[in-house]
Image: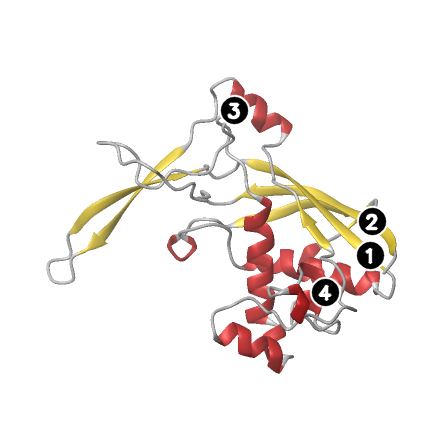
Amino acid sequence: MQLQSIRTLTGRIRLHTGLHIGAGKDTVEIGGLDQPIVKDPLTGAPYIPGSSIKGKMRSLLEVGIVMGMSEDTRKFVLDGKPCGCGRPTCPICRLFGAHNDPSKCDPKLGPTRLLVRDAMLCKEDGERFAAGDLPMEIKNENTIHRVNGTAGNPRPLERVPAGVVFDLNIVLKVFEGDDPDNLAQWLFKGLRLIEMDALGGGSSRGSGQVVFENIILDGKPIDLSTINVL
């Protein structure tokens, strides 16, 4: 299977609400954060892992669109798993790769077409962070007592504050036999679905609302608001 072209999509991710993508903790500290965000270990700056963007696109496309088109995908999704049908006709497996043993996939499927890079702070916000002018937000979430209505058991949640901007960079590989426009449309649908949903944790409680700005594919501006996701 011959590589025909490599397309590049760039843009920006602007946070409309605070973003929490957890880093996990190996130790528990008195007075420390229960849920810190993922950060660059060298600079301490927050970033959005490419795996978070790619994984959210895939899950939203599978549940929202492809599950209704493919019985094979439906079986995987209803079992709580990413699609692993491995069929060349499956847009999910073609774009994101089959979530299965490669030996069980159709060899005509080929390699993953989509490469999503980690989204780092844009130049302006990176400089603000380096200067100490971009503090992270601590949001306390509580459990409401069902009888007396009081809040208890506060949980401190670290978030990147609203208004912060990250750089977006995605690579789309086109192989022999691919329809490049079709691959791009599925990518656009995935990004648009994230705008309509959210990124990261706590989305049902207000976190992670984002908008993609200045999206450009191979020098051509793309307006995601015109993308039909149905």
Q: What residue sits right under mark 4 in the picture?
A: 94
10 Å crowding of disc 3: few (<14), some (14-19), many (20+):
few
Q: Quadrant of the C terminus?
A: bottom right
Q: Which of marks 3 and 1 precedes in the sequence? A: 3
* Residue type highlighted by circle 2: Ile
Q: Residue furthest front?
A: 103
Residue type marked 3:
Leu
Q: Quadrant of the N terminus?
A: bottom right
Residue underneath mark 3: 42
Q: Quadrant of residue 123?
A: top right
Drawn side of residue 152 relative to residue 116, left or right: left
> Which residue shows up at 58% across the image and 42% down it?
14
Counting residues from the start of the chain, the first of labels 1 and 2 encountered is 2
Q: Callout 2: helix, strand or loop?
A: strand
Q: Position of residue 206 (x, y in %)?
A: 41, 52
Q: Position of residue 174 (x, y in %)?
A: 82, 56
Tell me which residue sits at (55%, 59%) in the image. 196
Secondary structure of the residue carrying tag 3 is loop
Dot label at residue 174? 1
Q: Is residue 29 visible?
A: yes
Crowdedness near tag 1: few (<14), some (14–19) or many (≥20) residues, C-alpha within 10 Å: many
> Image height check: is 112 above or below 44?
below
Task: From the image, tell me which residue sits under label 2.
Answer: 6
Residue at point 28% right, 32% down?
A: 32
Residue 53: x %, y % from top left: 58, 50
Relative to 48, say whether 130 is above or below.
above
